[in-house]
Image: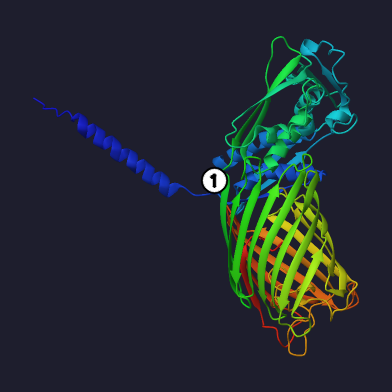
Amino acid sequence: MVKTTVPSRNAKILRTLLFAAFLLMVGGIARADVPYEVTFQPTGDDDLDSAIEDASQLSALNDRPPDSDAALRSRAAADRERINAVARSFGYYDDQVEIEIDAKAQPAKVTVKVTPGPQYLLTSVSVVGPGGLPLPVTAPPLAPADLKLEIGKPALAAPVATGDSLVERIFQSHGFPFARIKQRKVTIDHGAHSMTVVYEVEPGHMSLFGDTKITGLESLDPGYVHNRILWQPGQPYDIGKVDKTRDALVATNLFSTVSIKPEQNDPPGVTPMLLDVSERLQHTIAATASYSSSDGFEIGGSWEHRNLFGGAEDLKVTAAVGNEVSALQVDFRTPDLFAVGWDLISSLGVINLDTDAFNATVAKVAAGVEYKAVARIAFGAQLSFERTTTNNYQVAGEYKLIGLPVYVKRDASDDLLNPTRGDRESITITPYTDPDYSPLTFVSGKVTGSVYQRLGDDDTYVFAASAAVGATFGVSLENLPPDKRFYAGGGGSVRGYAFQHAGPNSPDGDPRGGLSSIETSIELRYKLTQTIGLVPFIDAGNVYDSSLPDFGKKLFVGAGLGVRYYTGLGPVRLDIAVPLDKQKTDDSFQIYVSLGQAF
C-alpha cells in the first residue's frame, strides 16, 4: 500500500511566493537599460522642427533610458502620434513620420525623419447661427481678420481654436452678453490642400445694461464703487466696459476679489449686473532691511490704512533708520477730489542725512493733486516747502525752498519688486526758489526709464535695463545746496562704488556732487531654480559741473554678480560689485543686500 502526502494549503502558498520572488530577482538581474541618442532631421520649417522636438518623449526622456529594446520601440511608436498631431497643428495634413532605431549601436541610435508634405491653406471662414442658419441682422459683422485669421495663409490650428473666444467676445462687445460658441466645424480638403472653418454661435438676446447690484462691501462706501462703473443703465451691453471696470477696482488694492457677471432676465432685453467684491484687510504693516559694505545696515517699516474714513482715504506712515539716512514721513491721499481719478495728496516728513558728501536735516511739507488719466499713467503737481540746516562749509547753514514739482509717471511692468515684462518711465521737473535768498532760484529735472524683457516663454531669462538723466538750470554748483545736487554710486545706482562716490571728489576725498548726472544699468536675470537666481550686471554713471551732462566725459563703470532668493514677498538680493574705474577712496569691492531687484 502506497501512502500519499497532500501538501497543506499554506505550503502551496509559500512555494508560490518563493517562486514569484525568484522570478522577480532573475528579472531584476536580467534588466538592462537601453541608453540612446536621438536625432531629428530638419523639415525645412524651423517652427515645426522646434515644436516636434518639444513634443517628443524620445527627447524629453532621453536621460531616463527604457529597460529594453521593446520599451524603446514603444516609446518611439507613441512619438509618431505626437508628431503627427504637431504637424497637423502647423497645417501639414499629409505628413509622414519615420523613426529608425539602430539597437546594435552603443548607445542606440534613434533617427526621427518627418516629411511634412504640402502645407494646407485656410480658404474660408464663416460665422453662422445655430444649425447653420443666418444670424440676426443686429449681429455684428465678422470678417476673418476680426478673428486674426488670414485667407490664403497656412491653416494653423492654434489661431483657428482661438477664434472661438474671439467670436464670443465680439458678440459680447456688441450687446449680446450670453453669446456662446455651439460648435466649430473644420473641413480638410486633401485634394485641394485646404481648410475651411465654420463657427456656429448661439448669440442669445441682444440686451442693454440694467441696474447693478453691489454685494460684499463691509466698510467701504458703495459710492466709491459706483463711481468706477463705466456703464450706465440703458446702454448696450459691452464686455469691454465690464473688464475695464473690474481692472479699475482691482487696481485700487482695496479688494481681494472682484467678480462682475450679467444676470439672465425675463423678459430679455435688459440685463441686470451683479458686482461682488471681497474687501482686503484695511491695515498693512511692512518692514524692510538692507546692507551695504560701505554704508552699513538700514532698517525701516511702514503702517498703512487704506480706508481711513470709509471713502478709500489712504494714510501711510514710513520710518527708516540707517548709518547715513534716517527718516520719518506721513503720506495722506484722498481719492476723487474733483472727479474720479483726481486725488488730493499731501505729505509731511523729516529726514536726517549723514553722508560723506554732506550732513543735513530737512523738514518738508507738500500738498497737491494727482490725476490718473489712463491706466498705468499718472500726472501730478504739488506745492512744497522745505527747511534745511546743514553744516557743509560750501553753503549757508540754513535755507528755505519753495518748490513746485510737476511729474508724469508710467508703470507698465508686471510686478513691483520682480518685474519680468514691461517698462517704467517718469519725468519730474521742479522749480525752486528761496524767498530769503533770491540767487537761489533754479529748476531741477530728472528723466528715468527701465525695460524688462523675457528671453523665452517664461521668466527663466530676463533682460533688464535702466537709464536716468538729471539736469539743473539757473544756479552754480557752489550755490546749489548739497542735498539738491546729483550724485551717483551705491546699491540703487552704480554698484561697485560707495554711496555717492561714482563721480568727482573734493580735495579731501568727499563726493562733490554735480548739476547733472547720467546713470545706466544692464542685467541678465537667470533663474537656476524657482527660488534661486543669478544676475550678472554692469552699471555706469557720473555727475557733472555743467547744467546738462557732458557725454564726452568718461563714465564710472562697475560690474558684478548677484544672487537672488525668490520668496513670496519678492526676491532677496545679494550683489557683489567691483569698481572698474577705481579711485583712491574706493574699496576693492562692495556688497549690497536688500529686498527686491536693483531696479
- Residue 90 image position (x, y, % from top left): 79, 35
**Is residue 162 in view from this perspective?**
no
Seen as rendered, the residue at the extreme front is 436
- Residue 412 image position (x, y, % from top left): 77, 49
Seen as rendered, the residue at the extreme left is 1
- Image quarter (top left, top right, bottom left or bottom right) of the N terminus: top left
The image shows a total of numbered marks equal to 1
Determine which quarter of the picture holds residue 120: top right
Would you place residue 102 above or below residue 495 in this image?
above
Determine which quarter of the picture holds residue 398: bottom right
- Residue 359 image position (x, y, % from top left): 69, 79
Number of residues whose C-alpha sits closer than 10 Å to that of mark 1, classed few (under 14), some (14–19) or many (20 or more): some
Q: Which sits in the foreground, 348 or 317?
A: 348
Q: Residue at x 25, y 33 (%)?
A: 13
Determine which quarter of the picture holds residue 573: bottom right
Q: Which sits in the foreground, 194 or 284?
A: 284
Q: Is residue 348 left or right of residue 434?
A: left
Q: Which sits in the foreground, 85 or 516?
A: 516
Kindly state the secondary structure of the residue where label 1 is placed.
Answer: loop
Q: Which residue is mark 1?
A: 66
Q: Which sits in the foreground, 451 or 254?
A: 254
Q: Is residue 243 left or right of residue 292?
A: right
Q: Residue at x 66, y 40 (%)?
A: 311
